[in-house]
Structure formats: structure tokens, C-alpha cells
């Protein structure tokens, strides 16, 4: 078959991700997100976050026979759709992500495009 992309969707199990990482991240930085196409209907902020802990079991690497490394101390980006293009956070703040937006999140190859409706400061850096 041709053009099967219209019939497939790869989704992100955000609940499993947030649970495995404890939904607590160090805030690293931000940049504006502008919904130029109008498909989402809201601007926001793309934040860069550092994963502090990851309790997820990723299994064993078949080639080496050793357990796969976790995502602890890796960074990732998440888009926070609030209508504002800046968020009052300081580098090093401890934050949690709120209200995953599954309809506007997706996977491209191995990249996760995760969008949330909020971010909450847990502790100042």
C-alpha cells in the first residue's frame, strides 16, 4: 500500500514517562514557541529539562548482554502551551509537568514531541 501515513499514529505513553522519572526535573532554559500554522491554537514555551532520576527498566542490550542505561541526567524538551511565550523560571528550578496534551504530541523517528498545558515550580534552584 502507498500513503499509509494517514492511517497510522505513534503515541507517547506520557503517564509511564512521568511515573518512571518521578515528574521532577531541573529547569535548564526556554525559548518561545509560536503556533505559526494555527493547528494547535495556542503559543507557548519550549523548555529544556534535565531528568534527575529514572526508575524505568529498559531491559538488556542484546548485543552486550548488559542492562541498558536509564535516561537519568539526560535532557529533553517539552512545549508548554499556555498562550504565553515566556515562563517565570530560573535555571536550576525543580519543576513538574502538568496536563499532557496527547492530541498535539507525537513521535518523529525516535524524537518525542511532548506538549503539556502547564509546568509547576516545585522548588527554587
Image: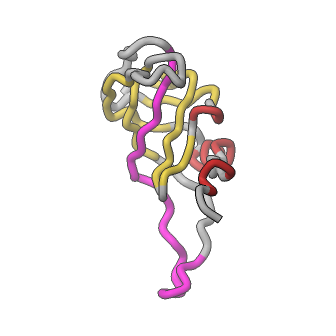
Left or right, residue 96 beside residue 8:
left
Is residue 62 located in the magenta-colored stretch of the structure? yes
Q: Nearer the viewer, residue 100 or 19?
A: 100
Residue 23: which quarter of the image?
A: top right
User: How many callouts does the rendering have?
Assistant: 0
**Predominant SS of the magenta segment:** loop
Query: Where is residue 110 drawn, in percent x and y?
Result: 48, 58
**The N terminus lies in which quarter of the figure?**
bottom right
Q: Nearer the viewer, residue 111 or 73?
A: 111
Is residue 79 located in the magenta-colored stretch of the structure? yes
Q: Is residue 124 visible?
A: no
Q: How is the image coloured?
A: secondary structure
Query: Where is residue 17 drawn, in percent x and y?
Result: 61, 48
Please tell me whether residue 65 is drawn above or below residue 40 in the rendered image: below
**The C terminus lies in which quarter of the figure?**
top left
Left or right, residue 107 beside residue 16:
left
Query: Where is residue 119 drawn, in percent x and y?
Result: 52, 24
Residue drawn at x 59%, y 67% is 58
Q: Is residue 26 visible?
A: yes
Query: What's the magenta region?
Result: 60-82
Please tell me whether residue 35 is drawn above or below residue 28 in the rendered image: above
Residue drawn at x 58%, y 78% is 60
Residue drawn at x 44%, y 24% is 37
Query: Where is residue 13 drawn, in percent x and y?
Result: 66, 47
Residue drawn at x 63%, y 57% is 4
Q: Residue furthest top?
A: 84
Amino acid at each position: 500500500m502507498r500513503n499509509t501515513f494517514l492511517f497510522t499514529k505513534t503515541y507517547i505513553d506520557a503517564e509511564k514517562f512521568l511515573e518512571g522519572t518521578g515528574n521532577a526535573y531541573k529547569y535548564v532554559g526556554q525559548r518561545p514557541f509560536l503556533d505559526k500554522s494555527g493547528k494547535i491554537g495556542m503559543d507557548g514555551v519550549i523548555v529544556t529539562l534535565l531528568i534527575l532520576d529514572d526508575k524505568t527498566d529498559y531491559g538488556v542490550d542484546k548485543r552486550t548482554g548488559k542492562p541498558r542505561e536509564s535516561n537519568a541526567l539526560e535532557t529533553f524538551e517539552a512545549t508548554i502551551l499556555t498562550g504565553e511565550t515566556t515562563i517565570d523560571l530560573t535555571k536550576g528550578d525543580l519543576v513538574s509537568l502538568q496536563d499532557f496534551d496527547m492530541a498535539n504530541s507525537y513521535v518523529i523517528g525516535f524524537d518525542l514531541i511532548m506538549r503539556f498545558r502547564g509546568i509547576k515550580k516545585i522548588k527554587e534552584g
